[in-house]
Amino acid sequence: MSDRLERQFAFLNEADRLKHVMRATTLVDGSRPENSGEHSWHLALYALVLADQAGPGVNIDRVIRMLLIHDLVEIDVGDVPIHAQNGQAHASVETQAAEARAADRIFGLLPDDLRHDLRALWEEFEAADTPDARFAKSLDRVQPVMANLMSGGGTWATYNVTFDQLETRVGSKIAKGAPALWEWVREKARPWFG
């Protein structure tokens, strides 16, 4: 029992470092960048509040679990803003490899049963091949859009994002897991781009 608790708290203490990872996206008031711990909490709340936007068969409890752990790898790798990836739709092969090594290390702190369960949940989110993961990924993409809208453009201005880029890099991912949500957000975002 004591070894299990040691490993559980080693993981929880390591996860606290996510609060030090600064993201490109700001708080909605634009006062400062959010950190990845705040982002993960906010996304879990998004899932709770926007559960009615999920497709059939989506398990919101699993989505919340995914969103709470999805960015833990940023402890080692840092935040990789989608609009800073030179127009690539996905993170580079190098970034993906670094994130896999980070997942090995961070989830490896846990007892075997938890390590296996949480690592599998993280991999499911990354692959976005299940209804739960597609909805979780949709929320992960929509939250920065809302922050940018509320903060006067945020990272759109920083990275000179066009509306076409927003649709390709972000909207297409939101639409896969929450099509009605993307239609609503799209109409809110369109006027910002003129």
Image (cartoon, rainbow, N blue to C red):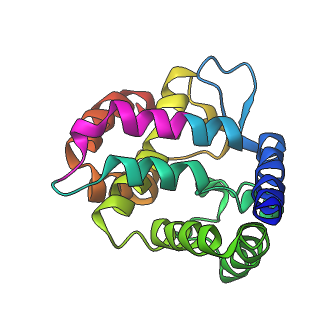
Q: Residue at x 80, y 52 (%)?
A: 9
Q: Residue furthest front?
A: 1
Q: Main secondary structure of the magenta part?
A: helix
Residue 132 position, x and y percent, is: 33, 59
- Image quarter in which the C terminus is found: top left
Q: Residue furthest left?
A: 56
169 and 130: which is toward the camera = 130
Judge whether residue 139 can be spotted in this image: yes
Q: Residue at x 79, y 68 (%)?
A: 109
Q: Is residue 14 magenta?
A: no
Whole-percent x, y for residue 46 in the image: 42, 35
Direction from residue 152 to residue 101 in the image, left or right: right
Name the side, left or right, on which 13 lies relative to 27: right
Q: Is residue 178 above or below residue 80?
A: above
Whether residue 167 appears in this view of the structure is no
Magenta-tinted stretch: 42-55
Magenta stretch: residue 45 in it? yes
Which image quadrant: the N terminus? bottom right
> Residue 126 in the image: x percent, y percent?
51, 69
